[in-house]
Image: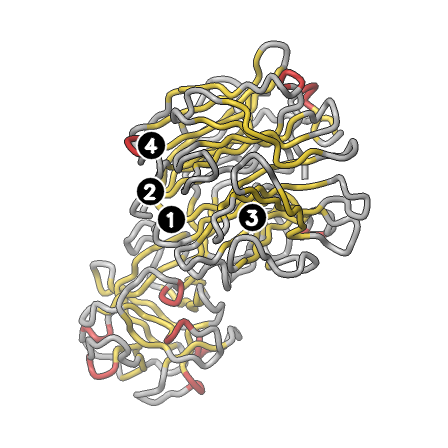
Amino acid sequence: MRRLVLVLAIIAGCLVTTGTAEAATGQLLRDDTGLYPRAIRLEHSGAANGRIMASVVTFQGNADGVGAIYESTNNGANFTQVGTVEDSGAADGKGLCCATLFELPTAIGAMPAGTLLWAASMGADARPMSLRILKSTDVGRTWSYLSSCATAPNDRGLWEPEFSVAADGRLVCHYSDETDPAHSQKLMEVRSTDGVTWTDPRPTVSSPTFGHRPGMPVVRRLPSGTYVMSYEICGLGGQYDCVVHTRQSPDGWNWGSPSHLGLRAQTVDGKYFTHAPTLAMAPNGKLLLIGQILQNADGSVAADNGRTIFANTEGSNGTWYELPAPVAVNNPYNNYCPNYSSPMVPSADGNTVLELATDYDGTVCKTYYATGSAIGTQDASGVTNATYRLVSAQSGHCLDVSADSREPGGNIQQWTCNNLGPQNFQLTSEGNGFFRFRGQNSQLCMEVASNSSTPGANVQQWTCQDGGWQRWRAVNVGRGYYTFVGQNSNLCLDVAGGSPAPGANVQVWTCNNLQPQIWHLERH
């Protein structure tokens, strides 16, 4: 993991290399340096609700670091700078790194809901370091010092502060900590009832292996009340170095054993992110995850590196699926600029997502922004007359003819993917986005039993007939991911109960945009 230290352009003690490739797609937030962007949609600020606020770290004067605060009143179509965060109490702003932006969802001490907090690592070139917090009560126009949630006891680093509010109503500051001599780095949290006094420091991820370096925590609270944290773990070595992980908490404070490293976030075909993750949540609870570099299951850099977001409707459980990223960054690599810690802001209806991402324009690292679909193209694009296997985005198992039946009435289930004929289906276009599914081995067609339109009706194979109960409309919901809607039933192909088990039944159910109804098409 490389961190930005503005003064002398040093990254964690390593000389920064800059790129000259074509810059990212999207609109420029500012036409000069803009680093470590953050963005939020205001939900607790009264008349300002719905506005999108953004911040970047930039230079001022003699290489002093400041926070530039931007506002969009048109859902991210364009931004205007409305404020500047300067912290004269921290070595004139030198050594500023890794700033964050947060809106209080509820009153904390004397601060009302809607108060904005901005925090950063200060003193990176003039130790000891501290995580200093400033507040704004006028929607980012002016800022004043509030407190420090952590101060280094030695000359090691404190990095990447992020905030959440726990279930008990206390404000929590999450950060990466290099100051413990027993660990190269660990993730920590502290909490406060007023935002001024911080207590109860404790690790959230602390590997028993000294060289492991968990970092860059981001926390979101699901509608269910469960909290999800994303983070990277560097020092693992090999293809999974700096791989992105997640973990859960029932209350936003207790995260289980710190020595448990969490779960690697990956897709059904094994793609995963490394470096600099961020996490966003749509109002419906769908999680969106991004990392700096997208890698294939074998560790190679994926073709859509710099152009991909992961999505998960199951609270970070199970596998994730892919969406095209609104900002396309050209071949990001392990460096503080390209696609480094890119924030996302879903729309109020969850159908679109705003992304801010950094990339080099010549030798200058700039911030770009764009909005794209968070629900795919919603049509049959990408599906052709060909043989496919369908992999559940929930379980990672394949659509399967039970026991390789060749008889009409043979059941359709999910089963461990095995590259055998009962899991291969010939898709043939019937027009208007509808397809017929013919089993490769049985040469029978997948249908809704008894032409039922009742949620929970069984899916089976039967002699191919010219009927709507055997036609399925393909609806693209991500890169290579689809739901399939019965023509007559208007219900979706679904794994019963969202089961992760091999042998779970496949049925039709009311379409709900959840992963038990999402299938990855793999051409065979």
Label 1: element kind: loop
The percent position of residue 457, horizontal first and vertical second, equals 26, 79
Q: Which residue is mark 1?
A: 282
Q: Quadrant of residue 177?
A: top right
Q: Earlier in the sequence, mark 4 or mark 2?
A: 4
Q: Label 2 amino acid?
A: Ser
Q: Quadrant of residue 503?
A: bottom left
Cα–Cα gap, marks 2 and 3 = 28 Å
Q: Does the residue at mark 3 contact the one at mark 1 (Cβ under 8 Å)?
A: no
Q: Label 4 amino acid?
A: Arg
Q: Earlier in the sequence, mark 2 or mark 1?
A: 1
Q: Relative to residue 88, is residue 480 depicted above or below?
A: below
Q: Which residue is mark 3?
A: 302
Q: Which residue is mark 2?
A: 347
Circle 4 Cα neighbour tier, 10 Å, few/some/many (<14 / 14–19 / ≥20): some
Q: Label 1 amino acid?
A: Ala
Camera-side residue of 73 and 143: 143
Q: Which residue is mark 4?
A: 51
The percent position of residue 245, horizontal first and vertical second, equals 59, 53
* In the image: residue 123, left or right of residue 286: right
